[in-house]
Image (spheres, helix red, strand yellow):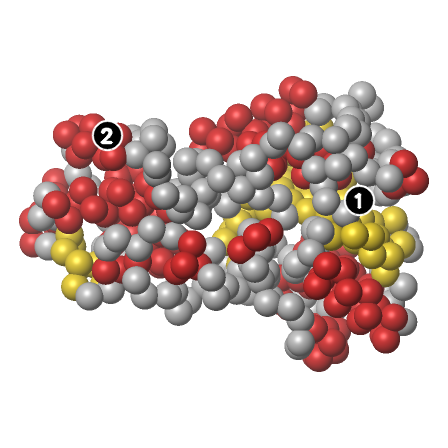
């Protein structure tokens, strides 16, 4: 095992431990599909892929077309290190999201109807969206925490169309969307007008400071940030600057697919130490994303299992809820030099030159 750890550590810049290898091996005992193995491992995409390549070179797993199987040697290795198949004991009623959709189910057909011709995700803005169930699961979560009823809510980047779900629920007093993609700006604006949903849609690139009339104006923000440290900090800082004061809330997703636990740790320190907010909730795998068309074009597909597009939902993020303390930090300045989308842990592959 120690040799395996040091070999994988040489293949990737992401720090790896024997526990990581354990989780990835455990996933290979439960699934032969790469995307499912990544999902089950709860480890960064690039770490899982490099580990699987090392396991294959050492004869512990074998790639057959797009599938991955443990070899006899691999099973023996697992037995020696007490690696057991990935278990699943999540709550089957709420899928581990801890909330009930019962009060929101009636809105689903109308949401599906009005969002049926939504713009497709594009790579330029790292888009990939959640389905209607998750959009309403977010509304149910906000409602459960008292963060939407009669509240002024802002959504920073809305490729998930949560603004439409929020408006259909009739709960918020005001809904504002900041969006950089003109196709989405037009879509949300037009749909809102047609359905009389009164959503305020503002075209805005979050690298630029927010218009002053948005500062300190909202009770709750939602966002789905890109996962470089710079991207995470920028999107959350923009959310925080819109909030009215102490006791306001922010919601966002963070994956284990594009963010190692080291990055989680670094980001959590930024939140608590620099911005003066506290993390009240982290709901594991709350957000499940639909598969997006450009995935295979954006990754390095150098092994067979990476050449076949995922058929199941594999890309998930944990839902964070943060709350502001009395002296939380609000900054509103242009941040133009930040790298939003690419770091060594991001899914997207850029040619090393
Ligand atoms: Fe449950």
- Is residue 249 in view? yes
Q: Residue at x 80, y 71 (%)?
A: 191
Disc 2 to disc 1, how far (Cα)? 43 Å
- Can you tell which mark lies on residue 10? 2
Marks counted in the figure total 2
Image marks 2 and 1: residues in contact by CB distance under 8 Å: no
* Among the two numbered marks 2 and 1 on one chain, the one whose residue lies closer to the N terminus: 2
Q: Image quadrant for the N terminus? A: top left
Q: Position of residue 66 (x, y in %)?
A: 24, 64
Q: Where, by quadrant of the figure, is residue 195 drawn?
A: bottom right
Q: Is mark 1 within 8 Å of ligand 1?
A: no
Q: Residue at x 64, y 68 (%)?
A: 119
| Front position among marks 2 and 1 | 2
Q: Secondary structure at mark 2?
A: helix
Q: Please identify the residue farthest to the front as the structure is shown.
A: 353
Q: Position of residue 94 (x, y in %)?
A: 57, 61
Q: Image quadrant for the C terminus? A: top left
User: Mark 1 highlights which residue?
Assistant: 220
């Amino acid at each position: 095992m120690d040799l395996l750890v040091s070999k994988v550590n040489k293949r990737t810049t992401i720090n790896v431990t024997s526990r990581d290898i354990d989780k990835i091996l455990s996933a290979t005992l439960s699934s032969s599909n790469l995307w499912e193995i990544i999902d089950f491992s709860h480890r960064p995409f690039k770490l899982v892929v490099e580990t699987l390549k090392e396991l294959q070179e050492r004869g512990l797993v074998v790639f057959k077309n797009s599938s991955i199987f443990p070899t006899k040697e691999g099973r023996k290795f697992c037995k020696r290190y007490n690696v057991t198949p990935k278990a699943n004991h999540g709550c089957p009623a709420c899928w581990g999201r801890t909330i009930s959709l019962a009060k929101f189910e009636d809105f689903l057909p109308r949401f599906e109807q009005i969002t049926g011709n939504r713009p497709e995700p594009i790579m330029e803005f790292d888009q990939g969206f959640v389905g209607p169930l998750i959009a309403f699961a977010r509304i149910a979560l906000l409602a459960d925490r008292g963060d939407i009823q009669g509240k002024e809510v802002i959504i920073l980047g809305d490729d998930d169309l949560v603004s439409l779900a929020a408006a259909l629920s009739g709960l918020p007093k005001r809904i504002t969307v900041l969006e950089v993609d003109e196709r989405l700006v037009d879509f949300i604006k037009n749909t809102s007008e047609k359905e009389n949903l009164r959503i305020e849609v503002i075209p805005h690139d979050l690298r630029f400071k927010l218009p002053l009339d948005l500062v300190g104006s909202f009770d709750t923000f939602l966002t789905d940030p890109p996962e470089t440290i710079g991207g995470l900090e920028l999107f959350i800082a923009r959310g925080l600057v819109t909030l009215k004061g102490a006791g306001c809330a922010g919601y966002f997703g963070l994956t284990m697919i594009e963010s190692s636990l080291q990055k989680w740790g670094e980001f959590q320190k930024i939140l608590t130490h620099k911005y003066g907010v506290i993390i009240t909730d982290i709901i594991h795998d709350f957000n499940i994303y639909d598969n997006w068309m450009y995935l295979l074009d954006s990754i390095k597909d150098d092994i067979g299992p990476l050449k076949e597009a995922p058929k199941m939902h594999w890309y998930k993020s944990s839902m964070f809820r943060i709350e502001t303390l009395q002296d939380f930090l609000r900054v509103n300045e242009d941040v133009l030099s930040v790298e939003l989308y690419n770091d060594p842990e991001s899914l997207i592959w850029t040619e090393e030159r």
